[in-house]
Image (cartoon, rainbow, N blue to C red):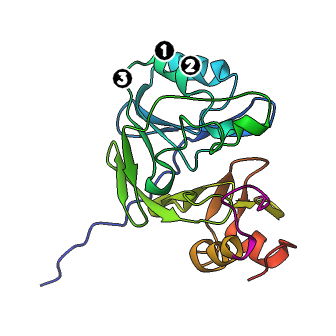
Amino acid sequence: MHTPTNPPTSVATPDIRGYELGPYSTNSYVIPSPDDKSCWIVDPSFDCEPLLDDVRARGLRPAGIVLTHAHCDHIAGIPDVLRAFPGLPILVHEAERDWLGEPELNLSAFSGMPVSVPGPTGTFRDGDMLDLGGMPWRVIHTPGHSPGGVALYHEPSGTALVGDALFAGSIGRTDFPGADHDTLLHSIRTRLYTLPDSTVILPGHGPKSTIAREKRSNPFVRA
């Protein structure tokens, strides 16, 4: 007897919106769940009111602040987010658990704008699966730009938020304390370039790209 099978269901690409914020033109992101109104706020930077206005306008319910790393331009907006949405958990890689409140670690001490923010309330490590309203996101540790840099990878839709590890046509700086050039190149080649070529990358600065495009043409690290 022939048993009918259900047709494959397509996976909608998350409606991720980026906001170029602050003096370093940092990309801060809002990731909403398609199944409910929950969302994550990723890397809230300086002057993040436009992001918060959009969260309110869409009626989203922030479920947490998730950080790709803890440099000052990726954490400076945390106090503003917490004032708007008190009590949110704050998650960062365990290697940077102490960076949020320490200007010398988060580099703000060298910028003339010391940043010390609350948190984190929890940490993650490589391979952890984070759930947002039924959406699975895998943590991929990508040290080199900073010791606790990570990418957040949604395999069903082929989407990765890659922080400051990899940019369209460039890579993250490695002249900061705690950075290492060879480590970053290794992270890109073995952790990011092994993702499917069709993966869309959303970086911490600049426009989006794809893994295929960067493997083919990034002048700093070829496949």
In the image, taking residue 31 as reference, residue 38 lies left or right, namely: left
Query: How far is disc 1 from disc 2 in space, using C-alphas?
Result: 5 Å
Placement of 21 over or under 216, stated as above or below: above
Q: Look at 56% across and 19% down and name the residue there.
A: 80
Residue kind at label 1, given as amino acid type: Arg
Residue of label 3: 87
Q: Where is residue 188 in the image (x, y as percent from the top left)?
A: 66, 72
Q: Are marks 1 and 2 in contact (CB under 8 Å)?
A: yes
Would you name the residue on which mark 2 appears?
A: 80
Q: Does the magenta stretch include residue 208?
A: no
> 124 or 174, which is in the foreground?
174
Label 1 environment density (alpha carbons within 10 Å; few <14, some 14–19, many ≥20): few
Q: Give the range drawn in magenta.
A: 173-182
Residue type indicated by callout 2 = Asp
Would you call the spot at circle 2 few (<14 residues within 10 Å), some (14-19), or many (20 or more)? some
Tell me the number on the disc at residue 83: 1
Q: Label 3 to label 2, Cα distance in Å? A: 12 Å
The residue under label 3 is which amino acid type?
Gly
Quadrant where the N terminus is found in the figure:
bottom left
Location of residue 109 in the rendering, given as x and y in whole percent from the top left corner: 72, 36
